[in-house]
Amino acid sequence: MATLAIAVSLLSTLSFVFTSSSPDVVSSDLNIGSYLNPCSVATHGRSILHSKSDPLKTRFDQIRKQVDDHRSLAQTYAAYARKLKFEKSKLVRVFAELSRSYTDVLSKPAYRALSDSDTESIDKTTMRELEKKVKERIKVTRQVIVEAKESFDNQLKIQKLKDTIFAVNEQLTKAKKQGAFSSLIAAKSIPKSLHCVAMRLMEERIARPERYTDEGKPRPVEFDDPKLYHYAIFSDNVVAASVVVNSAVKNTKEPWKHVFHVVTDKMNLGAMQVMFKMKEYNGAHIEIKPYEDYTFLNSSYVPVLKQRESAKLQNFYNFLNMENATKDTTNMKFRNPKYLSILNHLRFYLPEMYPTLQRILFLDDDIIVQKDLTGLWKVDMDGKVNGAVETCFGSFHRYSQYMNFSHPLIKEKFDPNACAWAYGMNFFDLDAWRREKCTEEYHYWQNLNENRTLWKLGTLPPGLITFYSTTKPLEKSWHVLGLGYNPSISMEEIRDAAVVHFNGNMKPWLDIGMNQFRPLWTKYVDYDMEFVQACNFGQ
């Protein structure tokens, strides 16, 4: 507003000066200092008044030089005003008008003729009139510059501040990207002590194979008994898997009626066998099996295995580096090979993996059980397939956050405001699953999403799609989430939960895990086991 007021005042001044015929003119001996070009000041140190004793032709040349200098000065300030974002300001118009006024005064025929005249024929009256008009314009130019300088300085400070803020924001954005990348690396790396435990367990398995192998032994009938309580745990983390089983067994009333189906890969099979055979679990039954033993899991049947053979998809995952990650932080967390891990997608094949079972409880390896879970087998599923705790509140955790609703197929089939639910503790009615042909539904959508146009990646979006109309909401106290990213979860809510879930990057076995929640997990670690002690796990 101050700049606008100055500009209006200057326009009024110009209007008065350029139209006035008053003979009273203030002398042009103001010191313009830094406003004039230093070279010009040095060359033409004397004012126009001081040049009256010079020959008339020289005197005219000096007047014209002053006109050119001040016209250039006005043009320079006009350009500078534009640079300082004054395009819409009247200051630009003021300086442009000043520049034109110098051109206009020299373009009048009477004054233009002076440049073509010799010294003897120059009209002194015309010379004085020209000098008078030039001095008027020089005076106004200097006044405008003096009054505009403060606005220029303020605007320059504002512009510099904006530039500084922009630079700081750029640095902040870069730091956030680097932090996100570092956090991703920290979350997905295997701690040395955890790796040590797995290696020592494997060493034990190699040293005493006869103690831990099940080869040649009949399959326990409990593994296929639908009357018992069955759990599915898919993991390659030997300590985390043991914590899940430990917590479930210690908090159940009749552990001998519970069967835990632990599925891993062949690389971790030996370590898992040793871990679960070195101790008793109060009569609970534990099956250890590599997913490679399920022969139906091949690329001709499983879309994820087929997609993993794609060179384009391999590049998307396997070339995650600092440069690529910081260019695309939005999708960086999805560029994790775990999202195409078959262990992650086994949850869609439960009826085929356990054909004799009717119901099964799926547990992630980053949960702990705090209460007896047999009550889940008494829940009326109302013919639904998936019993899960819903996570939506307000506009958060709706289907629109997990799927691409700009895709016509997604838009047609699903409600963007439908409430999402959580993986981690899911009770599945396998008879209803077979009836609804959920695995076929999963295959259909997974094949359509080969180019990641329907959803980014992971198992939750295809789960939301597969069980869209076949999910039974469970009471929230069955499953409390967020202990891997949300420090504000109340301890009262945690105490009331049957299962707590360390979903997020800050897993309790990592250094970046949250200290206030870590004891909930560590109390189920087998610290008395010699291999855990030898590796200083958790210390």
Image (cartoon, rainbow, N blue to C red):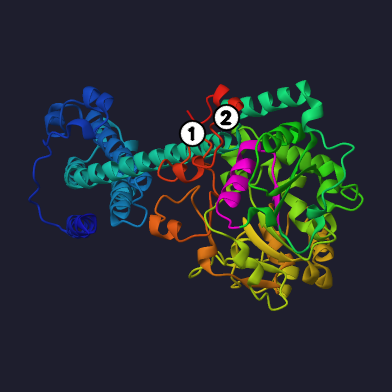
Picture disc at residue 191: 2
Check disc 1: other Cα within 10 Å, few if <14, some if 14-19, many if 20+.
some
Task: Please tell me which residue lies in front, 482 or 60.
Answer: 482
Check disc 2: other Cα within 10 Å, few if <14, some if 14-19, many if 20+.
some
Q: Which structural element holds mark 2?
A: loop
Q: In the figure, residue 429 lies in which quadrant?
A: bottom right
Residue 238 shown in magenta: yes
Mark 1 and mark 2 in contact (Cβ < 8 Å)? Answer: yes
The reply, left or right, for residue 8 in relation to residue 268 is left
Q: Position of residue 503 (x, y in %)?
A: 55, 50
Residue ID for mark 1: 511
Distance (Cα) linking label 2 and label 1: 8 Å
Residue 364 shown in magenta: no
The reply, left or right, for residue 379 in relation to residue 143 is right
Region in magenta: 230-253
Q: How many labels sit on residues?
A: 2
Mark 1 is on which residue type? Asp
Q: Which structural element holds mark 1?
A: loop
Task: Please tell me which residue lies in front, 407 or 436.
Answer: 436
Q: Position of residue 489 (x, y in %)?
A: 42, 55
- State whether residue 407 appears in this view: no
Mark 2 is on which residue type? Pro
Give the residue drawn at x 57%, y 59%: 372
